[in-house]
Amino acid sequence: MEKSRLLYVVLFHTVFASFGEIEANLLNYLTVPVRQFFADSLLLRYGIAPYSSQFEFVYSMVASIFFIGAIFGGAIMGPCMEHFGRRATAVYLRSFLGALSAICMLLSKWLTIIELFAIGHFIAGVIAAWKIAMFIYLAECAPDHSRGWSTSLIGSGSTLALLLMASLCLPSVFGNDQLWWLLPAFALLLSIFHLCFAAHFPESPKHLFCGARRNKTAENCHERAKLSIKFYHGSAADVFKVMNQFEQEQQLLTSREHFKWTDFWKIPELRHSLCITLLTSWVFAFSLTNLKSQYLESMLMRYGLTQTGAMISTMALIAVTAPFCFLSPVLIERWGRRPLFLLVTSFSVAELALITGAQFASDQTASGGNDATAALALIGFTFGQSSANLGILHMTPILIGELIPHAARSATIQVNLLFASPLFIFIVIAYPPLIDTWGALFFMPMALISAVLLFLLYRWMPETKGLSVNTIFRRMAKLGLLNSSSEGSTTSINGDGYEDEETEALILKN
C-alpha cells in the first residue's frame, strides 16, 4: 500500500510537471514556424530582414536566453528551497512560473511580439533549473530503498513527454505557422493542474525535521514530519527509526545550521562529495543535450535531412530509445548508481565521437550533408538519446540527494550550477557562429573532455544504492577516499559510528 501511494505521487509529478519540458523545447521542436514568427515580428517592429545576419544574431540570443534563465534560476533556487521549502519551490513556484512562461509565449504569438517569447523562454530556463528541486523533493520524501527509482521515474517521464511533443510538432499537426501556439497552451493547462492538485501532497519529511531547529515551532514541525513519513513511507513505517536517521544526518554538519561555501573546504568528506557531483554536472554540460534542446532539428537538416525528415527522425530516436525510460528506474536499483551512471557517460562520449565524425565528413564535401553523414549523425544521436533516457540529466540531483547532507544541499546545487552553467551557455551561444568555420573542431574538445570525465568517475564514484546519507558520508571517511587526515575526518563527523551492525558490515565488505 505504501509503495503504491508513493508510486501515485511520483507518477502524478511525472505527468503534470512535464510542462517544463514542453516550454524548454519549443524553440527546438518548432524551429520552422517559430523562426517564421521571429521573422514576421522583427520585420514588422524593427525592419530587420528575414534570415539576415541580424536575424540570426537575434535568434541565437533568444535561444541562449534560456540558459541565462537557467543560471538565474539556479542562483535563487537554493535560498528558495531553504526559506520556502522543497514543496513550495518544486510545486508552487515552479508551476506558477510554468503558467507565466506559457502565457508569455501565447501573447507573443497573438500580438506578434518577439520580446514576449524571449521572456517566456527565459522563464522556461528558470523552470528547467528548478526541475532539480523536484528531484531533491522526491528524494527526501522516498525511503532509502525507493529513492533511486522514484527520482529516475521523474527523469524518464520527461523523455516520454518529449516523445508526445515530437509527434504533435509535425507540420501536419501543430508544427505550422497557424497552430504552434497550441503547445504552450497545453503546457499552461498542465502547470495549472499541477499547481492545484500537487498542493495536497505533504512537504518533505526530512526538510520538516531538519528545518525544525531554526523554526520557532519546532514541535509542530516534528509532528508534521511524522505525518509526512507515514504518508510517503506507509502507515506501517518505523517513524522513530526514520527520524533517528534524519537526526544522524543532521549531526554530520553539527554546529553548521547556516552552511557556508567555505565549509566545503573545511570538511574533506564534503569536499569529495562536491567533486563527484561537479564531475557529473560537467558530463551533462559537455554533452550535446543542451545543444540539441535548441538546435537538434537544424543539426539534422545540416547533415542532410529535410524538415519533415528531421522531425520524423527525432520521433524515431525518442521512440527507439524509449524502453530505456522504463529500464532506468529498474537498473538504478538493480545495478546501482555507479555502473548505470558510467554507462550513461559512456553513451555521451560515444555520441560526441560520432557527431565529430559526421561533422568532419560534412566538412569534406562542398554540398554539406548527405545520406552517409545523416546516418552517422543519427547513430550518434541515438547514443545521446539513450544517455538522456537512462539519466544524464538527473545524475547530479540524485547524487546530491545521496552524497550531501541536508544542510549543504542548497549550497551544493548553487556551486554545481555556477561551475557548469557557463559552459553549456558558451557552447549554445558559440555553436551558430563557429560551426561553419570550425567544423569538427567544435565538437572534438567536448569529446576529449567527456572521455577524461568518464575516467575520473570510474576512479572516484562510490556506490550509494540503498544506503542512507549519513551512512554514505561516513563510508567515505571509513574508506579514506579523500586521503584525508584523521583530524579532518574527526572534525566533520559527529555520532557514534554506523546506524547498525549490518550496514557497517556491508560497508567494510565493499
Image (cartoon, rainbow, N blue to C red):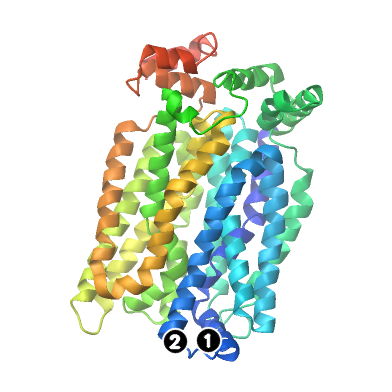
The mark found on residue 51 in the picture is 2
In the figure, residue 463 lies in which quadrant?
top left
Which of pointers 2 and 1 lies earlier in the amino acid sequence?
1
Query: Where's residue 30, x and y in %?
Result: 53, 76
Query: Where's residue 206, x and y in %?
Result: 66, 29
> In the picture shown, does residue 188 fall above or below 287?
below
- Please state which amino acid type lies under the numbered disc 1: Ala
SS for callout 1: helix
Q: What residue did someone put label 1 on?
A: 39
Q: Quadrant of the N terminus?
A: top right
Q: Residue at x 73, y 64 (%)?
A: 189
Query: Where's residue 268, x and y in %?
Result: 41, 24
SS for callout 2: loop
> In the picture shown, does residue 35 fall above or below 274?
below
Nearest the camera: 165 or 58?
58
Q: Is residue 261 left or right of residue 183?
A: left
